[in-house]
Amino acid sequence: MKNMKTKTKCYRHGEICFEIIDKLPNGLIISKSREFLKGSHGNSHIYDKGEFYPKVEGEYIFGYFVAKNTTLKHLEHGDKKVGQLKTAKLPDNVYCLRRAVEKVNGELRQVID
Amino acid sequence: MKKYQGNLIIEKNDKTNYSDLEEVTGDLYIYSSVTLPKLTSVGGHLYISSSVTLPKLTSVGGDFYISSSVTLPKLTSVGGHLSIYSSVTFKAPKLTSVGGHLSIYSSATFEAPKLTSVGGDFYISSSVTFKAPKLTSVGGNLSIYSSAILPKLTSVGGDFYIYSKISIDLAKRLWDTNRKKNTKWYICNLVPEWLIERVATKNNSVFEINNVELPLKWFNKIRKDELTVEEVFAIDNIEHRRIAYEMMDKTKMKTLKNYKVLDEGIDEKGKKVKLVSFNIQNMKENLIFYNCFDASTNREYWLQMDGTKTWKEAKNSMFGLKNVEWIKEW
């Protein structure tokens, strides 16, 4: 079993990646906002239940999230439309939140959809 | 029960005989198939979500929400907002005015041959069949997302959101009547060139192609396909790049130097993806782009992922990861 690689398990919601992790890092401060990110066209990635801990670490990680009966909401990303927004059920887990980034001539550029 | 004081809710399986009901002073909610042969007025809001026959209804004082097809031969006015939801057919041959907003959502049919005024905003979604040949004024914003024929509309009190083809006649009428007002114009590439040229003279105008807002200079270059393929791939904003690629003559791709497909396959959602490289302006290194499709919208994107060798590596490294099991994507 030596050298066996374990795959990182992830969910993707547009330009956000929800990477499953074992536990939260120490020293986080919970957010009162229900919004993870806002795209360049004003389309917010929002959630209804759960705990969002914003924390920027490098170019990719922008926070952590504990999902508990969580529904993600966005104008375009989701399984079904409820009112004006599409919804997606995110399973209960602890997640590291990552944002999509382009690699341009050795530099990183944030993707905003 | 000729006059019902307060709010009345007609639930599913309601067996009450409402044949004498003439007036409801408050709100009326209809969730059950029912005939109200004598009802003439509702003082508050009216919600219709089941098949209903209302042969004598003449006025609704408050808002009117309709999610089931209905014909209202006597209705003349709605005091509040009138909202007609998806796939509903609404016919009101005597309706002349809507005091609040008039909103008609996708695939609905609206026929009101005598309607002349809407006091609030006017909104029609895509795929709406709209027939109101006498509508002359809208008090609030005008939002058109469907090919609407509005042969008499001249006065609009609010801003203009025109995201559908409209006739040159309507364009000229709206511009000539309203151009001096302090209102804002939001237009797309589908409106007549005549209107684009004029709206471009207003400083605060907003221009869109396929729901993506663009600066005027880019709006014009992209819609006229005046960009070279190198210029398209050099656009920083990925949504602008996506739209520019969508509008671009794809034969221009053949002009890219050293174009090569490095890797291709089918992604977790069953969509064709590839990793390509090409050279621009004799740069030392080739550029590498990951060509993929959004899981929810199916939009085609080109994301620059220099240094990657496979499409899977490009997709994972976009999030700073290497070996990923994508459980679900939206």
Image: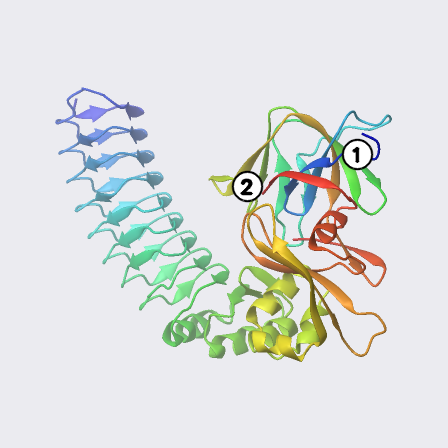
- Placement of A29 over or under B117, stated as above or below: above
- Placement of B138 over or under A19, stated as above or below: below
- Placement of B113 over or under A100, stated as above or below: below
Question: What secondary structure is found at the residue carrying circle 1?
Answer: loop
- Seen as rendered, the residue at the extreme top is B15
Which mark is drawn over residue B278? none
- Residue that mark 2 sits on: A78
Indicate the amino acid at tag 2.
Gly
Residue B144 drawn at (x, y percent): 43, 60
Confirm whether residue B228 shows in the render: yes
Disc 2 packing (10 Å; few <14; some 14–19; many ≥20): many
Give the foreground label among 2 and 1.
1
Left or right of residue B263, residue B103 in this image: left
Disc 1 packing (10 Å; few <14; some 14–19; many ≥20): few
Q: Nearer the viewer, residue B69 or B321?
A: B321
Chain bearing tag 1 is A
Residue B257 drawn at (x, y percent): 72, 77
Question: What secondary structure is found at the residue carrying circle 2?
Answer: loop
> Where on the picture, by quarter, is residue B224?
bottom right
Chain bearing tag 2 is A
Residue B229 drawn at (x, y percent): 66, 75
Distance from disc 2 to disc 1, alpha carbons, whole Å, reads 34 Å
Residue B272 drawn at (x, y percent): 58, 56
> Where on the picture, by quarter, is residue A102?
bottom right
Left or right of residue A84, residue B102 in this image: left
Q: Residue at x 73, y 69 (%)?
A: B234
Q: Nearer the viewer, residue A50 or B94?
A: A50
Indicate the amino acid at tag 1.
Met
Confirm whether residue B205 shows in the render: no
